Image (cartoon, rainbow, N blue to C red):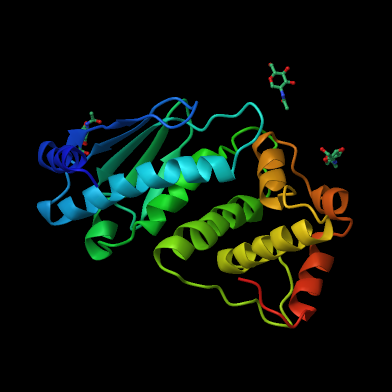
Amino acid sequence: MQHSDFFILVSVAVICFGSIDKISGNSPPLKIHINGTSVPSKLSRFLLEAQTALYHWHPLISSRLSSPNYTAPPLIYLNFENCAKYSAASHNFGPFGRITACTPHYLAHPTDIGSLITVLTFIIQNYNIEPRPAHYVTYGVAQYVRRYMYEKEEEKKVLKKPGPTSKFDEHSTSSDDLAYFFNYINLKFKMEEENEEMDFIQLLNWDSREGKFNSSFWEDRLGKDVHQLWAEMVKEDNSLN
Ligand SMILES: *[C@@H]1O[C@H](CO)[C@@H](O)[C@H](O)[C@H]1NC(C)=O
Ligand SMILES: *[C@@H]1O[C@H](CO)[C@@H](O)[C@H](O)[C@H]1NC(C)=O
Ligand SMILES: *[C@@H]1O[C@H](CO)[C@@H](O)[C@H](O)[C@H]1NC(C)=O
């Protein structure tokens, strides 16, 4: 990090409201506004890390989840509130992305940048036109991004393969198992098509974003339904990470 960047970041924490512009490629300049006026000074370091992480990951996630004619909101507001309900963070869709982060959560978990990456991903996914995809698609894609992009780079964690007797259930399969499954399909798809360009995550994201996802997606794209694909995955001996 350069000196001048550091100065700007520090002044954000001191003034508690600020933005930095960054220009990447042809996309509009990215702005992350952080409003930390209500945040205790104990969290100043967290604010700096959050801002740095959002700037770093926004373009990477936008590119991983790209689709024709779509630009992720280049303006993100991150506001802190003393939420009554104990949760990490939530988001709103719109011409700009708004993340509401709950101060009590971050006081208790002052390193939890991952939860902000998840809500940033929801904003970039923008599954906001009807019919919306099934919840498991929204959460599975977001968890794929968190586990296989963010954590793989930042924390070097790997996910465990779902158990051999597990079954896919769109209401109860955990986000981690969904992330594992989506990663498995993504790798398998590239191998079977013998085409590195084939990207299952992008197809799933594209259909979901445009309101075109329904349960026939699996048959149409992969020739098998989601339950069959899951059963094949748990039967295989190897683990993919
Ligand atoms: C910043 O956050 C404080 C406390 O949550 C709020 O009262 C204020 O309106 C916010 N400012 C802006 C510009 O959103
Ligand atoms: C993108 O937008 C252009 C102009 O509106 C349109 O002609 C084109 O078909 C769109 N492409 C896709 C894949 O939706
Ligand atoms: C599901 O989506 C496909 C592809 O967009 C479409 O052809 C099909 O009619 C849809 N099925 C239902 C039941 O909506």
The location of residue 235, given as percent across then percent down, is 79, 80
Q: Residue at x 24, y 64 (%)?
A: 108
The location of residue 83, given as percent across then percent down, is 29, 49
Q: Residue at x 66, y 44 (%)?
A: 205
Name the quadrant where ligand 3 sits. Answer: top right
Decide if residue 29 is on the left or right side of residue 65. Answer: left
In the current view of this chain or complex, which residue is farthest to the right?
A: 223
The location of residue 4, given as percent across then percent down, is 17, 37
The location of residue 32, given as percent across then percent down, is 33, 35
Q: Residue at x 25, y 32 (%)?
A: 19
Res 122 visible: no
Q: How many marks?
A: 0
Decide if residue 115 is on the left or right side of residue 200. Answer: left
Decide if residue 7 is on the left or right side of residue 200. Answer: left
Name the quadrant containing residue 38: top left
Name the quadrant containing residue 209: top right
Q: From what the image shows, is residue 238 above or below residue 47? A: below
In the current view of this chain or complex, which residue is farthest to the front?
A: 2
Q: Residue at x 71, y 66 (%)?
A: 169
Res 45 visible: yes
Quarter holding the C terminus?
bottom right
